[in-house]
Image (spheres, helix red, strand yellow):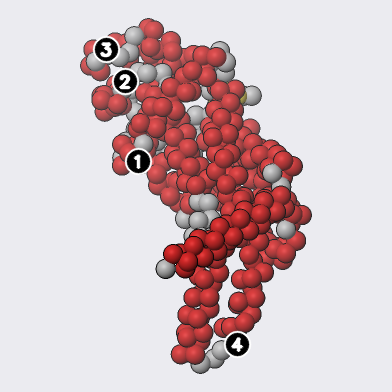
Amino acid sequence: MYFDFVTMASQSAANGGLFGKLFWPLYWFFGKCMEGLLFVFDNKYFLALIVFTILTRLVLFPFNLKQQKTMAKTNRIQPKIQKIQKKYNINAITDGRQRQKANQAMQEEMQALYAREGHNPMNMGCGPMAFQMVFLMGIIGIIYYPVEYILNIKISDYQDAVAKIINFKATGTNRYLQLDLIRNIADYKADLLANSSKVGGIFTEQSIAKIEAFKDGLNIFGIDMSQVPTWKGIIVIIPILCLVTSIASTLVSTLIQKKNNPAVSQQQSQMLLMMLMMPLFSFYISFKLPAAVGFYWVISNLVAIAQQLVMAKFFPPKRNIAREMVENTIYRRSREESIKKMKNSN
């Protein structure tokens, strides 16, 4: 579902649809960031994208840390939850009404437990996933619209006219006007200059030189990042690296959680197969989007692995659980004191 949404959103963005209109402020901001990084790194696209990815992951780090703390709180009260579940043993009740009644009583007791512990089970830290989606849409936007948002050549109002000048027809993997313009700028240069007046004079020797320089920077180790990967040629390494780094990130996360919380290791083992489905989906979807998106995922996965190792070393779950126990003790005592004061005042 997640990757179906990404595919649909990316197609809408590429065609200037709902997502393209909704996320254009993000495209503009990300475009300015990439423009600055390309200037710093002398138009080396892969270095700019690597640094940009690292910066976005650093922005997400506090949210990931908060998610880990929330998980620590959940793990701390997990034995109490299991005790309540064992008490009611709903799965052993065959009568429908009795089962419903027992389930309601169990849920009420769990809600009371959450209230005592100051824990909200619905607050499981969806922030990182939501922000990753936003960042991904921003990345997709500037990859599909580099002429508009990175090179600052305003062709959005003249897309149909530009397509007519260069005889562009969306077919197969060649469905993105601005990427086609960049890839074939040498062939289109003369026509664009000759018909520049038809598109508001946006194509000049200087603007086309910017496109040519950007095109040169898109080639990373012989791979054109504007192309959609296929099984032919060296470009297939991008989807393969997406798969490998995504699996590595999943395995590192699983191993760290097993080491720090053996109580959930059995549950994690059962979920491992499901967790490995995400890397397979990323492998599939990387054949549907330009290679630059896959390259972003590869770098993002590598940075995620590094973040997980750093968090495991400097912010271990056991330390978070211990801190959570202290904070919970303080919270409960404060709550008891407040109740006493209310009773005394009455």
Residue that mark 2 sits on: 154
Residue type indicated by callout 1:
Phe
Residue type indicated by callout 2:
Lys
User: Do the CB atoms of the residues marked 1 and 4 lie less than 8 Å apart?
Assistant: no
Residue that mark 4 sits on: 92
Residue that mark 1 sits on: 19
Q: Is residue 307 left or right of residue 28?
A: right
Position of residue 151 relative to residue 335, above or below, is above
Residue 28 placed where, x, y %? 38, 27
Query: Which of these two is toward me, 325 or 198?
Result: 325
Residue that mark 3 sits on: 201
SS of the residue under disc 3: loop
Crowding near pointer 1: few (<14 within 10 Å), some, many (20+)?
A: some
**Which residue is at the far front?**
345
Residue at left 66%, top 54%? 326
Pick whichever of labels 1 and 2 is earlier in the sequence. 1
User: Do the CB atoms of the residues marked 2 and 4 lie less than 8 Å apart?
Assistant: no
Label total for image: 4
Q: Is residue 23 visible?
A: yes
Residue 291 placed where, x, y %? 54, 34
Pick whichever of labels 3 and 1 is earlier in the sequence. 1
Mark 3 and mark 1: span between their CA atoms? 28 Å
Mark 2 and mark 4: span between their CA atoms? 66 Å
Mark 1 and mark 2: span between their CA atoms? 19 Å
Mark 1 and mark 4: span between their CA atoms? 49 Å
